[in-house]
Image (tube, rainbow, N blue to C red):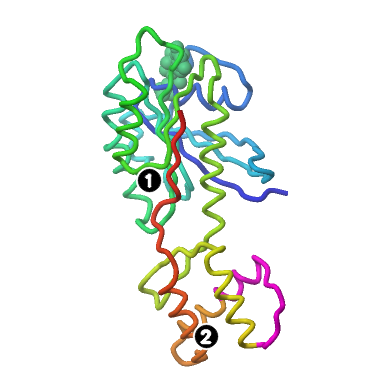
């Protein structure tokens, strides 16, 4: 049994090492001189992070201009991505905005979609054109969620990059999205609302029964659903929902983490 299945996408300029990354991660082998990537392909890998077992569906977009029409399909349904650039090629990092805008077109602003900037070919020390500091600076200024340098050739940090993204995606499942009156979509951090749900339930039932994570989600969903149905809502539930939406933190991106 898996705690989650996530579609993740690899994106970035041609020749940065996207195609080499997945086999490296899957089999720990570096395959050089791969044939040109055509269209879109994906691989599946299971990974255990912080005791949670997840299945990653890793999608590699070929990046060839003539396959651009496939981009929306490629991004759709993804939960996170690795933007790959080549540390020996400055323009592959400079194109980050083009790539991010392609993704933003497919991802709704309120969706949580962690992205880690990955500088590949870290083994090519002599040919380095982008310093780590510069990579980090650019990543930070684009408001992405992390930065890491890797080498698909030596395997350095490859697993760590996937683990970091997985950790971010898993942390997202610790919050839920709810729609209040179809207009506002808010992210609720579970820990934050557990307390108010507990208070609400205690008030209603006059007991001190400890609530679980699952019952928290259930209560929130139920109360907001009821609150949305104009006719049948219970005044208590509606005010609870309103108070809840006032007290919660609205998050648009997960906590930022950086790696060296
Ligand atoms: P893609 O076009 O982004 O899928 O990139 P590829 O995976 O096809 O890699 C492009 C070229 O860079 C190939 O010749 C790879 O062998 C080479 N390459 C990929 N990753 C590394 C790396 O970490 N170090 C070195 N030295 N070469 C790499
Ligand atoms: Mg290629």
* Residue 87 x %, y %: 36, 19
The residue drawn where x is 44% and y is 25% is 149
Q: Nearer the viewer, mark 1 or mark 2?
A: 2
Decide which of 64, 84 is in the foreground and name it. 84
Residue 215 falls inside the magenta stretch: yes
Decide which of 68, 86 is in the foreground and name it. 86
Numbered mark located on residue 72 in the image:
1
Numbered mark located on residue 237 in the image:
2
Residue 117 falls inside the magenta stretch: no
Residue occupying the far top of the picture: 126
Q: Is residue 141 left or right of residue 238?
A: left
Callout 2 secondary element:
helix
The magenta segment is 205-221
The residue drawn where x is 61% and y is 72% is 218
The quarter of the rendered structure image containing the C terminus is: top left
The residue drawn where x is 51% and y is 25% is 21
């Amino acid at each position: 049994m898996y705690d989650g299945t996530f579609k993740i996408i690899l994106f970035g300029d041609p020749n940065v090492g996207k195609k080499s990354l997945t086999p490296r991660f899957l089999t720990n082998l570096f395959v050089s001189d791969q044939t040109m990537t055509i269209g879109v392909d994906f691989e599946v890998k299971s990974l255990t992070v912080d005791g949670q077992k997840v299945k990653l569906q890793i999608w590699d977009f070929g990046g060839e201009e003539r396959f651009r029409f496939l981009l929306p399909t490629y991004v759709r349904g993804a939960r996170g991505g690795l933007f790959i650039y080549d540390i020996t090629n400055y323009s592959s990092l400079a194109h980050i905005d083009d790539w991010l805008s392609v993704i933003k077109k497919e991802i709704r602003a309120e969706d949580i979609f962690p992205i880690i900037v990955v500088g590949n070919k870290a083994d090519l020390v002599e040919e380095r054109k982008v310093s780590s500091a510069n990579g980090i600076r650019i990543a930070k200024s684009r408001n992405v969620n992390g930065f890491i340098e890797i080498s698909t050739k030596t395997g350095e940090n490859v697993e760590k990059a996937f683990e970091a993204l997985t950790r971010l995606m898993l942390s997202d499942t610790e919050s839920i999205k709810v729609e209040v009156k179809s207009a506002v979509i808010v992210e609720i951090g579970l820990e934050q609302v557990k307390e108010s749900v507990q208070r609400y339930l205690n008030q209603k039932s006059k007991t001190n029964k400890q609530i679980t994570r699952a019952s928290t989600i259930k209560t929130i969903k139920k109360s907001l659903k009821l609150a949305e149905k104009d006719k049948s809502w219970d005044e208590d539930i509606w005010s609870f929902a309103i108070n809840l939406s006032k007290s919660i933190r609205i998050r648009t991106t997960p906590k930022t983490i950086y790696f060296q």
